[in-house]
């Protein structure tokens, strides 16, 4: 099973299956053909409830249209045998160029050993060279704290840089469960539960159950 936001490249059989089974309108056939021609990756998404054990649920996020800025994400489902390779989301340090080169370089440097990866518009623009980033775009980051100390450091770092950058994104706990880092901060103040995203489901949870997955200290 692939984690959400992982990058997935298809082989010829995978692309054939994607075209045959795509739930997208025929107008998106050109996009599928271009992705195959350019060998650009798709993005792993949350699994459909009726997906088989050998099926992989993927998304092809198109650039916002020039008129209204609408974003279209083509939902795809293929057999696992159609996957050529897959990787974790792009490391923050791999982004080049970007609209915020100095600040993002500083963020990557200050993160030290804390893994920070990028998904969303900024990642897709870096991977394809297409125009995804607009004046309204967020910088979607994934932070992977392994310890309570790293979690505290990640929240402090993201909060600091969010005063100068349009940061958004998720904390990925060792269990693979994901929580919006902004929501985590709000929940800490209000003593409320948080929305947890997993590969197959979304549910509310007490933050303490996630803290228990971290190494100590």
Image (cartoon, rainbow, N blue to C red):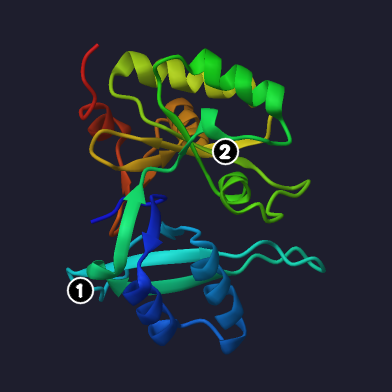
Q: Secondary structure at mark 2?
A: strand
Q: Which residue is mark 2?
A: 168
Residue 57 as seen in the image, left or right of residue 89: left
Residue 129 as seen in the image, left or right of residue 85: right
Q: Secondary structure at mark 1?
A: loop
Residue plotted at (32% across, 70% down): 48
Q: Is residue 202 above or below residue 49?
A: above
Residue 145 as seen in the image, left or right of residue 40: left
Residue plotted at (38% across, 21% down): 151
Residue 120 as seen in the image, left or right of residue 211: right
Disc 1 packing (10 Å; few <14; some 14–19; many ≥20): few
C-alpha span from label 1 to label 2: 32 Å
Residue 211, position as x, y percentages in the image? 27, 27
Residue plotted at (40% across, 86% down): 20
Report whether residue 45 is seen.
no
Q: Nearer the viewer, residue 4 or 9?
A: 9
* View extreme (right): residue: 67
Image quadrant containing the N terminus: bottom left
Q: Is residue 113 above or below residue 99?
A: above
Disc 2 packing (10 Å; few <14; some 14–19; many ≥20): some
């Amino acid at each position: 099973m692939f984690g959400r936001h992982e990058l997935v490249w298809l082989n010829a059989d995978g692309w054939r299956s994607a075209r045959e089974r795509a739930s997208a309108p025929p107008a998106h056939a050109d996009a599928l053909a271009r992705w195959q021609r350019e060998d650009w990756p798709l993005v792993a998404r949350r699994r459909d409830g009726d997906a088989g054990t050998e099926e992989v649920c993927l998304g092809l996020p198109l650039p916002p249209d020039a008129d209204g800025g609408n974003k279209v994400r083509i939902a795809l489902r293929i057999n696992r045998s159609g996957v050529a390779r897959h990787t974790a989301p792009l490391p923050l340090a791999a982004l080049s160029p970007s609209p915020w080169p100095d600040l993002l370089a500083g963020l990557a440097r200050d993160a030290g050993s804390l893994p920070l990866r990028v998904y969303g518009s900024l990642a897709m623009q870096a991977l394809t060279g297409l125009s995804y980033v607009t004046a309204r775009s967020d910088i979607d980051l994934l932070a992977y704290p392994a310890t309570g100390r790293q979690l505290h450091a990640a929240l402090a770092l993201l909060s600091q840089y969010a005063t100068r950058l349009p940061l958004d994104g998720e904390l990925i706990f060792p269990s693979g469960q994901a929580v919006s880092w902004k929501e985590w901060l709000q929940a800490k103040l209000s003593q409320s539960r948080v929305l947890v995203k997993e590969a197959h489901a979304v549910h509310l949870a007490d933050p303490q159950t996630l803290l228990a997955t971290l190494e100590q200290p």
